[in-house]
Image: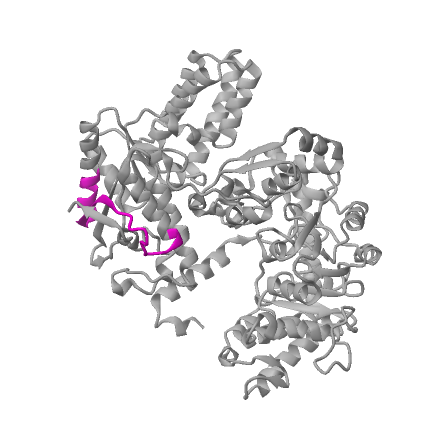
Amino acid sequence: MLQYLNQDPEILNIVKLEINRQAYNLELIASENFVSLAVLSAAGSVLTNKYAEGYPGRRYYGGCEYVDMAEDLARERLKKLFGAEYVNVQPHSGSQANMAVYMALLKPGDKILGLSLDHGGHLTHGSLVNFSGQLYQSIPYTLSRETKLLDYNLIEDIAKKEKPRLIVTGASAYSRDWDYKKFREIADKVGAFLMCDMAHPAGLIAKGLLNNPLPYCDIVTSTTHKTLRGPRGGVILIGKDRENPLGIKTPKGDRLKMMSELIDGIVMPGIQGGPLMHIILAKAIAFGEALQDSFTDYAKQVIKNAKTLADEFMKLGYDVVSGGTDNHLMLIDLTNKNLSGKKVETALGVAGITVNKNMIPFNTILTLTLKLFCDFPNILKFYNKYFTVILVDEFQDTNLLSYWLLKELVTEKTILILFGDSLQRIYGFIGAVPNLLGSAEQIFKMRKIQLDKNYRFADNHNMLQLDKIIRQNAITPFQNPNNFQANIEFNIFENHDDEAINVVQKSTEILNKNPDSNVAIIVKQRGKNIDTITEEFNKNNISYFYGLFTDDDQKYIRFNRNCLFEFIELLKKHKHITKRSAKMHIDKMKTIYSNENVPLINALIQLLSVFWDRVFIDYSFLSFEDKINLIKDTFEHNGLKQFVEYLDSKIIISTIHAAKGLEWDYVIIPDMEQDIFPSWISLCSKCRDKLNNCVIQINNYNEKAFLEELSVFYVAVTRAKKQVFFSASNIQMPGIRKNISCFMKLPGLHYKGR
């Protein structure tokens, strides 16, 4: 199969790398599987060439007689596999299958009752960052706090109170079986539709190893690529087809439409166009494989393996959520190990074991507070009554739990003041609700007050104009209707070496003229150019702080862990925390890393010294026990980087992400070239104007990426209090010339420099 990729060596190399990754790593992500060669062959077959809008026998195009056979075969096999009267095999994904069901049964604003995302639910079950939580009113149900199992009494109470139009069963991270009969009873009591998203356990349900939702649910959806071991895609099933209870009639008005007709019409032409016939063929093969007796043996072994793995983890003292598993997955709460899922995912990845981090139930103080408000309404009433003014800073980075908490606290009498800046959403911070700042006026019925300028630059006309130019381009890309003008120093060099020399010279020149000032060199990420800059600093014996580490940097994580271990050892010998014991701790860390004379370690030793200084300056009032907890907490959560702002270094090299919230007198931003700033992944790969000297045309295809990169650019620029300097290189690698960044072509910018 790979021989056909020889004509494109880059693509061939990517495929080979992925083949090796899958072959030599242990893949433990519950939503992934390994398909058969037959499924692979079908997914890459000539059926990909055929456009087949419509359904078998009712296509919009001719020449569909054979793809009709493929779709009919897939449908018949799927019906037999689950005992369904109706199926639709056209959804491109599980998410689109769910969207089709919602659009068939609901109107915008109707209530959905689904498992909370942080308790194992899926984004499409009502998450506010997803269409399901934006078009419909999402009401979450949760697991039992004590058992981490579904609490059917609690779910019934919520359903009776909220009267949802649709109850959704199924999850992405719940390891136990579901009582669909009980859910049916709850749905009937409140007059709700009942739906199951069985995407994860579908293959196990098909072989009778878990409860089957079809006899109880109005509609069932699934993906085909998890335990069904098929290609990536979605399906919709109905156990017993019937007339729709919504009163929707056929175009002639002579009868009520069947539920199956509603679904077919929503899938196509409602939300999709032509089906992926090569994938439908691959689905047919997977369904055929699942009908074989050998698939029963396979499914039983999957469950047996999962149960054994869960048992072994528990024997080793790990907290498996709900105390075990009934299906193919398990969720491990690492709280008692003082580890985060992110760190473990990264560490296991290095060891060749692929897993995915996930939220766990009742894991945060926000969740606990929400639970407290739910269980004890009088506490919520107290806050509603006496906390009548709420101020929220950095509102653009509000996450889902914070948003829910805010909604609980806000009443008609609450004075709510939100501070935020949509251009400060650098990379959207993980967990932040998209565009929440823009919709706050509608959500909370607020009045938006737009500041006409950045008051940090009130006395700096040129920086204020630069600020306004960038902000204007977020509204009208590459237009300057208000004629803002700013002079910037932008030096363009032939290669990285020359650029690096200039960055070092510019840093020393600034400090020579302004001895009391500081300088930050801000880059998007580590790379050849920044290595050249640090080498140039070292060669000239110029001191600087190397701040190019991230939360995921293994050396940074390990340094914090060693700090924690040595601090605990220190406590065994010393009963008090003194400056002398702090020095002993620092000296011990220097000894441990004495053979690693590299910028990162030197920087971390420097940060550790600053941290201890702040302990005695800012936290001297704490009790001995509280001081110990503070120090432990800092090391446990890799918190040393929080103390960068207290450094007295005159020159700091930092990433943009790490620089957010900090500021310096002067900022130097190198690498202002295409594919770096903006980055190739985020924007340049979507741009069709590289041959036009990167004079970008903003359209629906690239607008979102442009705004994301512009936000990053804005954060970098506004770290400077007095002045920002830019530079670029014509040649990044031997023989490869690059255009100057499109951000350097924003209207109103005037260069001075070389």
Nearer to me, 184 or 319: 184
Residue at 51%, 20% in the rendered image: 569
Nearer to me, 372 or 304: 372
- Relative height, residue 51 to residue 479 (above, below): below
Whether the magenta-drawn stretch holds residue 322 is answered as no
Counting from the top left corner in percent of width and height, residue 693 is at 25, 61
Counting from the top left corner in percent of width and height, residue 687 is at 35, 62
Counting from the top left corner in percent of width and height, residue 320 is at 67, 42
Whether the magenta-drawn stretch holds residue 481 is answered as yes
Residue 211, by quadrant, is: bottom right
Is residue 549 something one can see in this rendering?
no
Nearer to me, 424 or 413: 413
Nearer to me, 173 or 14: 173
Residue at 40%, 20% in the rendered image: 586
Q: Is residue 205 left or right of residue 655?
A: right
Residue 718, by quadrant, is: top left
Is residue 624 something one can see in this rendering?
yes
In the displayed orientation, state which residue is furthest to the left: 754
Range shown magenta: 474-503
Counting from the top left corner in percent of width and height, residue 620 is at 48, 14
